[in-house]
Amino acid sequence: MNQDLRIERTATGEVIIMPPAFSDTGNRNIKISQQLANWADQDGTGEAFDSSTGFTLPNGATRSPDASWIKLNRWNALTDEQKASFAPICPDFVIELRSSSDTLSSLQAKMQEYIDNGVLLGFLIDRKHRTVHTYRPNRTPEILKSPISVNADPELPGFILQMAKIW
């Protein structure tokens, strides 16, 4: 009935209903996904996913990052049935783009949840403050101010997110 809504679920079972992205956020999301998908096609070591993809994390939460990537060997280890559902896997790389309806603290908590569940690298893009928070396991998030690009090495060798069309 509400097919346009995105629904996530926390590890404790709380349902989070999110409206469709506003047009400007959707436009920027596609620019992010486009860059990641183009790199993934050229690189060939993994699969890229867009913002409509849900994953079941090891803690039981169902999350849908704005863009994500999974190493090919991990993705191919899933059954076809698992791939056709909210796959029981945590992406290796995630990107979250803060929209006007998101609080920074809620997205920071979401990014930490991704890291705690196995993400190797995460970018939290905050257009309002023109910052990119980079998350890696066992490190304090690094905050880049008005970067022209963001380098994903060494986790995604050669992937550089160009920020001009995202700002």
Image (spheres, helix red, strand yellow):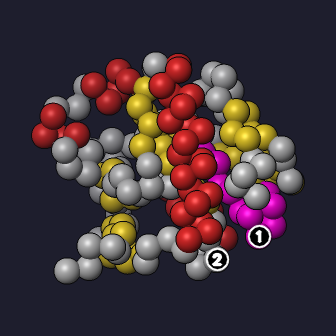
Quarter-wise, where is residue 139 in the image? top right
Residue 95: tell me if it is visible. Answer: no
Quadrant where the C terminus is found in the figure: bottom right
Label 1 crowd (10 A; few <14 / some 14-19 / many >=20): few
User: Majority secondary structure of the magenta segment?
Assistant: strand
Please say if 157 is above or below 166. Answer: above
Callout 1, which amino acid?
Lys
Dot 2 or dot 1: first in sequence order is: 2
Q: CA distance from mark 2 to mark 1?
A: 8 Å
Q: Which residues are magenta?
A: 121-131
Q: Position of residue 52 (x, y in %)?
A: 38, 57
In this rendering, position of residue 156 left or right of residue 7: right
Which residue is under mark 1? 128
Which residue is under mark 2? 100
Q: Nearer the viewer, residue 65 or 22?
A: 22
Q: Nearer the viewer, residue 167 or 90?
A: 167
In this rendering, position of residue 129 left or right of residue 160: right
Q: Position of residue 141 (x, y in %)?
A: 72, 50
Q: Nearer the viewer, residue 117 or 161?
A: 161
Quadrant where the N terminus is found in the figure: bottom left
Q: Nearer the viewer, residue 116 or 144?
A: 144
